[in-house]
Structures are given as structure tokens and as C-alpha cells.
DNA sequence: GTAGCTGCAAACTCTTTGCAACTCT
DNA sequence: AGAGTTGCAAAGAGTTTGCAGCTAC
């Protein structure tokens, strides 16, 4: 049983065939798939799955914080499994998304929030750049 | 003539009554209005304005970088005039958006991008927090 | 057994667009 | 005069939802 599946069970979700397929797709995706992407990949495994189920499942997973929903500047959502905390650098020429972590940044964000009188609960950072040649 | 109007003229846009109204709305808005918000406020000034024109104008202004389009986690876009560079802290309890700037952060982002082999072109940071009591 | 899940199709929300009329330069 | 702009309504994309049947627990 996958880690994702265990967490879903812990949250009281029934483990249906469709959900197992969707979890498997998310688990094995190295990128940041859109709903449509997840749907297509899921269909490769189980043809009968419907896109409504993909939407419903991703919404559930998002509420449980098992997945992160991104709204880049595209007009639709993209998802990724919430494994480790990291941020994204988007290559403006290729659209490629590079993940990174930075401890200094983490500390700075907590500090900025506290200076504004807030406890930091969540945050998002996206960098957009062009490759140096 | 407002600064925004001057920049539009410089970009070669024709200055119609509708555009003047939309620019005025943006200029005097202290928040981060949605298209619907801009439309409502514009209608208070000129009843005949259509939402299609608001969409078209905001898209133009976004392309010209006169305005910043935000996709917070809401399923629609919100806009603000691109005056000074800053970031947002969203109060998770009230939805209030607080703007801030931080020099240390600016330097760090350039550094992170360079370490990944990129020239930083643009970036977005959003903090989500709860007020300390 | 039953609460929860599914597929389907219709509905909904946000946004874009074709068109004929109009207007800024 | 002519290219650009507008309002309207229709269409498009992405997402949600009501419903009847099905399934995990």
C-alpha cells in the first residue's frame, strides 16, 4: 500500500479502483500535471474512469493537503504530491519547471511575517527566469 | 492626464471614454479588484460600459505591464496597477491582503536564480498567515 | 445495510471572440 | 479615411453538480 493510500485511509476515504489509479498516477508523475493530464494518464490504466472523478478526487486530496494545487498564469490548475516543501523556477523560454529549496529563504519568510504581526501558515514563491548562456 | 493614460498613449492605444473610466477605476482602487469588481466600479461612472471591454482592456494593460494579474487560489484573476514592486501577505482569517517589500528578499531571489543558472526576469511571493494576538 | 463513490450529462463560472456599428487620431 | 474599439450575444474553456446506480466497509 502506497504512502498516499495510507494517508487517504487514515482520512477515512474509501479506496476505490478509480482512486487507486489516480493516486498511482500522481505518485509516479515527475512533473506538475493538469487535471486533463491526470485524466489522460489514468485512462491509460483504466479506460472507464471519468474526468468528474478526477476533479473530485483532486479536490479531496487538496483539502487533505496531500496534494498541492498550483495556479500558475495559465487559467487552469496543476497538481503535485505534497512530499517535501519546495518552490519553483519557471524557465520562460521552455516552460520547464525547476524545483528548489532554500533554507535562508524559509527563515526570511518567517521573519517577514512576524514583523508584520503574523504567524506564517503557508507561502508560495515562483521565480520566472531565462537561462544564462 | 494620469500617468497610466500617458503610458497608454505612449504604447499607441486610442484613448476612448471606456478606457479612461477603467484607468480611473484602477488608479483609485486601493485593493486588488477582480474583473467583476472593475466592471461594477466602472459602471458607477459610465453605465454603458460592457464587461467584454473590461476584459479586453485589462488584457492589454497586462501585456503592457501596466497592471499585474494575480491568480490567487480563487479560480479567477485579480488586478492591480504596477506601481512599485511588492509582495502580498494574505490574512487567512479575514482575507485581507497586506503589501510588503523586503530588500533582503529581493537579493536572495536573484542569488537563488543565478545559482540555478538563470537570470531572474519576474517572480511572485505570497505569504499566508494568521494574526498574532 | 448504508454512507460514500461513480459516470454521465447538464449546468455553471470565467473568459474570449465574431460581428456590425461606431470613434479616435 | 481607416484602423482600432465597442457592445452584444454566442461560444469556449475549465470546473462543479444532480442523479440514479454501484461499491467499499
Image: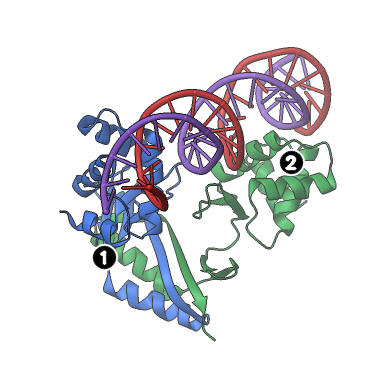
Chain colours: A blue, B green, C red, D purple
Check the image and name the residue furthest to the bottom.
B133
Relative height, residue B120 to residue A117 (above, below): above
Relative height, residue B12 to residue A73 (above, below): above
Check the image and name the residue furthest to the left.
A1
Q: Is residue A30 left or right of residue B63?
A: left
Few, some or many residues within 10 Å of mark 1 (<14, 14–19, 20+): few
Residue B5 shows in the view: no
Q: Which residue is mark 1?
A: A101
Query: Residue B73 placed where, x, y %?
Result: 49, 54
Front one among B37 and A58: A58
Query: Residue B19 placed where, x, y %?
Result: 74, 41
Q: Residue at x 62, y 55 (%)?
A: B81
Tell us which disc is closer to us: 1 or 2. 1
Q: Which residue is mark 2?
A: B19
Circles 1 and 2 in contact, beta carbons < 8 Å: no
Which chain is mark 2 on?
A: B
Q: Which mark is residue B112?
A: none
Query: Residue A75 placed where, x, y %?
Result: 48, 41
Query: Residue B54 placed where, x, y %?
Result: 68, 40
| Separation of marks 1 and 2 at Cα, in angstroms | 43 Å
Few, some or many residues within 10 Å of mark 2 (<14, 14–19, 20+): many
Q: In which quarter of the view is residue A120 placed?
A: bottom left
Q: Residue at x 27, y 69 (%)?
A: A102
Q: In which quarter of the view is residue A19 placed?
A: top left
Relative height, residue B122 to residue B60 (above, below): below
Amino acid at each position: 500500500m502506497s504512502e498516499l493510500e495510507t494517508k487517504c485511509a487514515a482520512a477515512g476515504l474509501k479506496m476505490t479502483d478509480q482512486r487507486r489509479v489516480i493516486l498511482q498516477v500522481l505518485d509516479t508523475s515527475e512533473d506538475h500535471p493538469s487535471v486533463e493530464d491526470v485524466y489522460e494518464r489514468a485512462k491509460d490504466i483504466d479506460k472507464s474512469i471519468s474526468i468528474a472523478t478526477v476533479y473530485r478526487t483532486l479536490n479531496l486530496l487538496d483539502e487533505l493537503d496531500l496534494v498541492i494545487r498550483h495556479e500558475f498564469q495559465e487559467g487552469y490548475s496543476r497538481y503535485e504530491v505534497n512530499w517535501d516543501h519546495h518552490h519553483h523556477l519557471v524557465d520562460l523560454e521552455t516552460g520547464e519547471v525547476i524545483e528548489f529549496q532554500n533554507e535562508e529563504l524559509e527563515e526570511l519568510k518567517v521573519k517577514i511575517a512576524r514583523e508584520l504581526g503574523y504567524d506564517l501558515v503557508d507561502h508560495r514563491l515562483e521565480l520566472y527566469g531565462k537561462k544564462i548562456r
